[in-house]
């Protein structure tokens, strides 16, 4: 996702016919925890193998009075089979944030590595693990929301099935493994047809509803990979919101690790 949709590692092991049938109808496990994990693994499996992609974004920030400001960004993501994905976000407009770049190395286990390049200071700032719950560039997305959402980052519990916007969905609760996460839990809605996240409710450290992320207008690329064209994060406690509008997705750009090293932050233009 920037979700932010921006942004996950995937399983590449082939699935036997029996295993595939189990994943397509995951509610056969012995417990709600196993059911929830099975659903999360199927979400992950269906998006594996994309290699890399780039996209352009429009970020719309709204305050509690409805006043808004906009930013233009570029994003690129590299799939890493043995670990979490690598991603780079570059701000192009307005001038006060132009050239700001944000690099993430997501990990399946342990804290993610994240760096922010600030052109005005001409320095790279490492984001400390205890600051991952802070707002990303003044938006309603936290730094931890920008990382790819690896299966191993959470434990899971299947809650129920229900309709959301006329779609049959699994409702799965997931609990961050990282003790420094800004969330106690997240309630997710995943459609049963394509296993795509449709909505996520985020609960703060007091276990009160903090934010809701809603996905809109999914499109399929290459006959396999689905991407949302719009994501909106609403902060229920402040009345603020941030919308990310994605366009010009391009897959198979032959990106490499060199495009995601720390020097790439300073090369960002």
Image: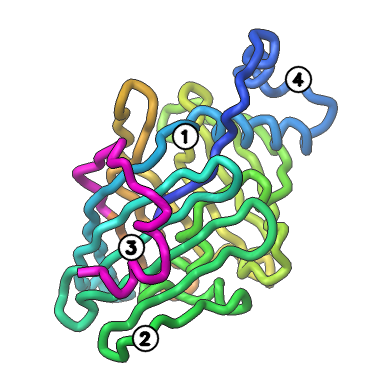
Q: Can you say whether 202 is above or below 39 in the image?
A: below
Spatial separation of the CA atoms under disc 1 and disc 3: 23 Å
Disc 4 designates what residue? 28
Label disc, if present, on residue 123 of the rendered structure? 2
Percent position of residue 137, x then y: 36, 75
Choose top left, top right, bottom left or bottom right for residue 12. top right
Spatial separation of the CA atoms under disc 4 and disc 2: 52 Å
**Disc 4 vs disc 3: Cβ atoms closer than 8 Å?**
no
How many numbered markers are drawn? 4
Mark whose residue sits in front, 2 or 3: 2
For the record, the magenta segment spans: 245-269
Choose top left, top right, bottom left or bottom right for residue 17. top right
The answer to if 262 sits in the magenta stretch is yes
Q: Could you say whether the residue bearing mark 4 is in a helix, strand or loop? A: loop
Percent position of residue 122, x then y: 31, 87
Q: Is residue 239 visible?
A: no
Spatial separation of the CA atoms under disc 1 and disc 4: 20 Å
Q: Which residue lies furthest to the top in this view?
A: 17
The answer to if 8 sits in the magenta stretch is no
Disc 3 designates what residue? 89
Choose top left, top right, bottom left or bottom right for residue 215. top left
Q: Residues within 10 Å of mark 2 (few under 14, many from 20)?
A: few
Disc 1 designates what residue? 196
């Amino acid at each position: 996702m920037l979700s932010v949709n921006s942004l996950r590692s995937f399983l590449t092991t082939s699935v036997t016919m029996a295993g595939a049938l189990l994943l397509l109808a995951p509610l056969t496990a012995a417990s709600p925890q196993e059911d929830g994990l099975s659903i999360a693994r199927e979400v992950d499996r269906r998006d594996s193998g994309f290699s890399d992609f780039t996209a352009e974004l429009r970020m719309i920030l709204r305050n509690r009075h409805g006043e808004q400001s906009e930013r233009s960004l570029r994003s690129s993501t590299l799939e890493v089979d043995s670990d979490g994905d690598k991603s780079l976000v570059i701000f192009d407009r307005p001038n006060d944030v132009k050239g700001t770049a944000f690099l993430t190395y997501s990990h399946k286990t342990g804290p993610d590595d994240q760096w922010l390049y600030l052109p005005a200071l001409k320095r790279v700032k490492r984001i400390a693990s205890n600051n991952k719950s802070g707002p990303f560039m003044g938006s309603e997305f936290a730094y931890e929301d920008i990382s790819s959402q690896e299966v191993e980052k959470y434990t899971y519990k299947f809650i129920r099935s229900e309709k959301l916007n006329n779609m049959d969905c699994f409702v799965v609760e997931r609990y961050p493994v990282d003790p420094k996460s800004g969330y106690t839990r997240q309630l997710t809605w995943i459609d049963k047809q394509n296993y795509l996240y449709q909505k996520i409710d985020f609960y703060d450290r007091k276990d009160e509803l903090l934010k809701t992320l809603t996905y809109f207008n999914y499109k399929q690329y290459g006959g396999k990979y689905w991407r949302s064209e719009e994501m909106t994060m609403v902060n229920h406690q402040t009345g603020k919101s941030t919308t990310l509008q994605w366009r010009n997705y391009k897959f198979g750009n032959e990106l490499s690790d060199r495009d995601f090293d720390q020097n790439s932050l300073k090369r960002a233009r």
